[in-house]
Image (tube, helix red, strand yellow):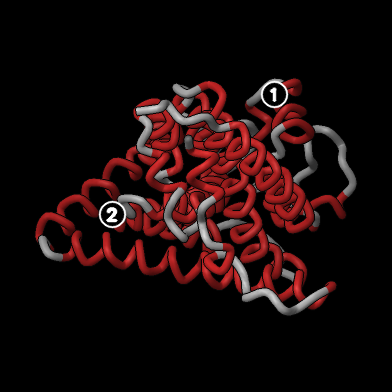
Amino acid sequence: MAESQASQRKPEAYGPKPGASGPRRGTSELTYGVRHGLRCYVLIAAMWIRSTMAYRMSFAMTLFGNLSVTAFDFVTILLMFSHVDALGGYSLPEIAFLYGAASTAFGLTDLLLGSMDRLGRRVRDGTLDTLLVRPVPVLVQIAADRYALRRLGRILQGSLVLAYGLVNVDVDWTADKVLLVPLMLLSGAAIFAAVFVAGAAFQFLALDAAEVQSAFTYGGNTLLQYPPTVFAKDLVRAVTFVVPLAFVNWLPALYVLGRPYPLDLPGWVAFTPPLVAVACCALASLAWRMGIRSYRSTGS
């Protein structure tokens, strides 16, 4: 049923009107599709933001609560350092740098795509069918659904810890190291976004895999908040070559800190997170398309 409904959607909703041909048409359709998707995302998110801001005190309390809950993660690290001088050979400012970079990158993705874990529920109860017949990309609708502005608390908390780390870390700053910091945050957010989308695509098959997705998203964020030296090398290899979360902050951050990577990779690998992010997003896009095509309605 979903396939027949989806086939009735007007092609004009996703691309320019027929008439163009060749590469120019393909480029125009892609450009229009991206612009259309972004516009729809902004409109849906704005709707939820207006709903949230209708109760400003409630929003302020939930934002503060989100900020406080995420802050407990770093409080745990502070408690550790009240008993030790270093953790895995890293000082508190160095840990703060790793923690802040991972938390800020993850917070950006969580703000934009934090609703992706609801996909499995929609597949089970059949409400995904209603999204398929709308002239808006399904990915955009799910990502912007129940847009939670309170997630800004995670970004704020991560940014404050990152600022503390940058100010207090003992680093001989050069142009390439300065460039790596914003590059690391943007690339890390894109890599986390790919993991979010790929995890959502997996729910088309598993139906109830939100916890599996969380293991790689929220669990991956927690993992990256600590230096790789505290983990077994097999785990470090897994998050480097299998699920490349190490490119979110470990590889570029250790280059900035002048620390060797446990797997003895060359130094130039620290500048590859943008390429890894592009590759991850391409694979996630492919997985998403395969998931959509494999979807069968519940019939309800």
Q: Position of residue 289 (x, y in %)?
A: 64, 43
Q: Residues within 10 Å of mark 2 (few under 14, many from 20)?
A: many
- Looking at the picture, does residue 142 appear above or below residue 123? below
What's under tag 2, amino acid-wise?
Answer: Arg
Number of numbered discs present?
2
Q: Position of residue 132 (x, y in %)?
A: 46, 47
Asked if residue 272 can be seen in this view, the reply is yes
Q: Position of residue 246 (x, y in %)?
A: 69, 40
What's under tag 1, amino acid-wise?
Answer: Leu
- Comes first in the chain, label 1 or label 2: 2
Name the residue that disc number 2 marks: 150
Residue 236's quadrant in the figure? top right
In the displayed image of the protein, which residue is found farthest to the right? 266
User: Which residue lies at the image location 68% right of the left edge and 51% below the top edge?
Assistant: 253
Gap between marks 1 and 2 measured at Cα: 32 Å
Name the residue that disc number 1 marks: 235
User: Which residue lies at the image location 35% right of the left edge and 51% below the top edge?
Assistant: 145
- Looking at the picture, does residue 114 appear above or below residue 55? above
Asked if residue 100 can be seen in this view, the reply is no
